[in-house]
Amino acid sequence: MSETVSFKCPNCGSPLLYDAETARFSCEYCGSGFSLEEVEHASANADAPFDWGDYAAGVSDEHLEGLISYVCRSCGAEVVTDAVTAATHCPYCGNVMVVEDNLSGLLKPNGVIPFRVDKKKLQEIVKNYCSGKPLLPRNFLTTHKIEEVKGVYVPFWLYNCKTDGSMTFNATRVRSWSDSRYYYTETSRYWVTCDGEMAFARVPADGSKRMDDALMDSVEPYDFSDLQPFAAGYLSGYLADRFDDDAEACLPRTDKRVKNSMAEAFRSSLHGFSTAVPVANNIRLIEPSVSYVLLPVYLIRASYNGEEYQFAVNGQTGKMTGNLPVSKGKYWGYFFGIAAAISSLFAAATFLM
């Protein structure tokens, strides 16, 4: 079977068209132009993964603060945004603007998980999340309460690593029995050491300083079997940021996470003991490597009684997380209702005595 060859834009991944007049390849999506030599060189290196070492060596003294202006290729308007924006909308014509400098070359992500939850499904998820909450203020998260809903491709680091080491426990085993005269309890004490090695793949940590780490952690897990090679076309209709919290800065979070997982595995391996208290821990992370991906998240911002609440929805699985407000009127009604029920039961019990 014959194979076909197609050239893709090195900046955004969209198909390239050949222009006979200029003898160059052009991208209709982002407007970039390339010579045949540039396209062939990019195609030869298309599968090269994001490499943190190459990035750190090739890009130094980045300034990601302040505002940068761009010109919309659709209507010509000037659009001002911050330095970490990778994709945004023109506020005048609605055109999707991809900031090629933040998604190409050394900054091109290894992959992307596309949004699988559409806006209609998102409404159902929000409704189900709020249902069955007796203390939730009435009509919270309805249209007039929601101030902002954004679909954002959030930059994430995916770490592969191993851990090895040991963990020591002070454990006990308790045995009880009795005879006709006495009740006996025997406590045996043990010094237990577990050691081993574990491998971890695709441990995520968001690489955006403006995203709340706990909120991003709480929308996991993602199904990484759906991870696609990056192409800018996935960004159409959504916002996107590039990383501004680098892989080395985020590594301690991953280090803590995988070590806790290994410690839990050690604890779970202990059987037949009444208690097991950890007294020493010698677990280390080895052979870490990292890739750079964009993961889909809906961010919802709402207000109630002057307080702002932020929620996140996994754009792939639909998992929603966030703190809900409590209606004071419902709270006290609920409290006094329970108190009245307890008083009635107490009175009935007193009457029967």
Image: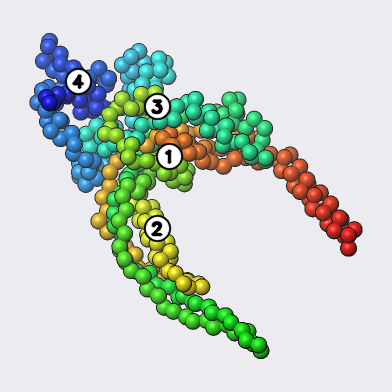
Which amino acid does the dot numbered 2 rest on? Ser
Secondary element at image label 4: strand
Indicate which disc residue 210 carries: 1
Circles 3 and 1: CB atoms closer than 8 Å: no
Q: Kindly report which numbered mark, 4 or 1, lies closer to the viewer in this rendering.
A: 4
Secondary element at image label 1: loop
For disc 4, the marked residue is: 16
**Label 2 vs label 4: CA separation?**
46 Å
Please provide percent x and percent y for residue 192: 40, 75
Q: Kindly report which numbered mark, 2 or 3, lies closer to the viewer in this rendering.
A: 2
How packed mark 3 is, by other alpha carbons closer than 10 Å (few <14, some 14-19, many 20 or more), is some
For disc 3, the marked residue is: 238
Circles 2 and 3: CB atoms closer than 8 Å: no
As drawn, is 173 to the left or to the right of 194?
Answer: right
As drawn, is 319 to the left or to the right of 40?
Answer: right
**Label 4 vs label 3: CA separation?**
22 Å
